[in-house]
Amino acid sequence: MNNLPSPHSHPTILIVDDTPENLTVLGELLQSVYRVRVAVSGARALRIAVSDPKPDLILLDVMMPGMDGYTVLEQLREDVRTRDIPVIFVTAMDSTEDEQFGLDLGAVDYITKPIRPAIVLARVHSQLELKRARD
């Protein structure tokens, strides 16, 4: 049995944010098109990332208590099981330096809060298309 997703299966998106309202906003925006999983902490996100269904894309908040988004991304990149999952940072930090740092760590994109639904949907779609092409 091969592990290729069927063309009808919905990509899985993991949303990581310590603020329930942000999870709700992103979840409601994405769940009509994608399978959505959520995590309220970096440690939980790392556990979910290696469990089935594995995320095809991770939307990751940067500023979280305990383990911040940068640390989560570094750990995802160190694990052979998760290093190829594209990560988009979703953050209120909007300086060029913050964005550059996130991209240098290996994030594929950077979306600033407050989110604009059309932008989020377009960027999520683009990254999933790129991942499908790479896979």
Image (cartoon, helix red, strand yellow):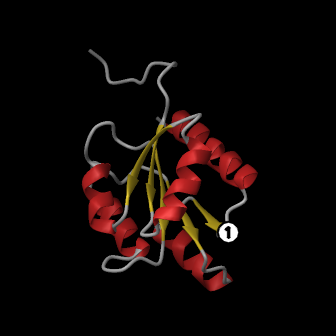
Q: Residue at x 33, y 51 (%)?
A: 82
Looking at the image, residue 10 lies above or below residue 29 = above
* Residue sitting nearer the eye, 84 or 113: 113
Relative image position of residue 10 (x, y in whole percent): 49, 29
| Residue in the picture at 42% in, 74% down | 70
Foreground residue, 20 or 87?
20
Q: Is residue 78 left or right of residue 131?
A: left
Relative image position of residue 17 (x, y in whole percent)? 45, 65
Can residue 107 be seen from the camera position used here? no
Residue 34, position in %: x, y? 53, 36
Position of the N terminus by quadrant = top left
Query: Please, is residue 29 above or below residue 42 in the view?
Result: above
Q: On the image, numbered disc 1 is attached to which residue? A: 114
Judge left or right: residue 19 versus residue 42: right
Q: Amino acid at mark 1?
A: Pro
Q: Is residue 93 above or below residue 127?
A: below
- Tell me where residue 133 sits by quadrant: top right
| Residue 28 % position (x, y) | 57, 46
Q: Nearer the viewer, residue 128 or 48?
A: 48
Q: Residue at x 46, y 63 (%)?
A: 20
The residue at 39%/23% (across/down) is 4
SS for callout 1: loop
**In the picture shown, does residue 3 fall above or below 120?**
above
Most extreme residue toward the top, as rendered? Answer: 1
| Residue 108 seen from this side | yes
